Amino acid sequence: MIHSVLKRGARDIEPFIPDKIRSSIGSAIRDSGIVGEKEDELTRKIHYEVVSSLPPEQEITTETIRSVIMETLSSIDDREYRTVIMASWVEHERRFKSF
């Protein structure tokens, strides 16, 4: 079970809070223009897939989390959703760069 996250550059360690991943994914989906019920459905689904795909280590890096998020986003079946959500996620990463 993951207990902590080693932040970018190995400078800080934070507790692992899965809701931070959910919030970041939700923001990217909302920013892509998908709102309402579909936003909630995609956020729940992608969050579940990301968290269950993370390696079972005690400490994980933000880079590993980001990599799993990108892999999960790239596997979205609907091409239109996949394209807009991935573009929004990349923009979200540029703006915030942390969870």
Image (cartoon, helix red, strand yellow):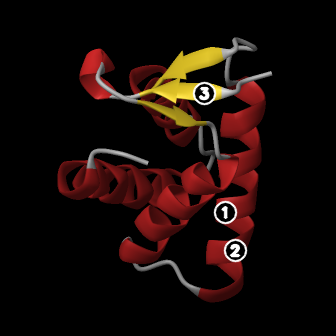
Q: Are marks 1 and 2 in contact (CB under 8 Å)?
A: yes
Judge depth for marks 1 and 3 and give the one in front: 3
The kind of secondary structure element at disc 1 is helix
Separation of disc 1 and disc 3 at Cα? 26 Å
Identify the residue at image location x=63%, y=45%. Answer: 77
Say which amino acid is labelled 3. Answer: Ser
Q: Which residue is mark 2?
A: 40
Closer to us: mark 3 or mark 2?
A: 3
> Under tag 3, what secondary structure?
strand
Pick whichever of labels 1 and 3 is earlier in the sequence: 3
Q: Along the polypeptide, which appears first: circle 3 or circle 2?
A: 3
Mark 1 highlights which residue?
A: 42
Towards the viewer: 6 or 34? 6
Cβ atoms under marks 1 and 3 closer than 8 Å: no
Residue visible at 55% across and 63% down?
23
- Residue 84, by quadrant, is bottom left
Name the residue located 42 percent from the left edge and 63 percent from the top edge: 28
Say what amino acid the circle numbered 1 marks.
Leu
Q: Real-space Cα distance between discs 1 and 2?
A: 6 Å
Q: Mark 2 belongs to which amino acid? A: Asp
Task: Check the image and name the residue furthest to the left.
Answer: 94
- Mark 3 crowdedness (10 Å alpha carbons): few <14, some 14-19, many ≥20: some
Residue under pointer 3: 4
Q: What is the total number of numbered labels drawn onto the structure image?
A: 3
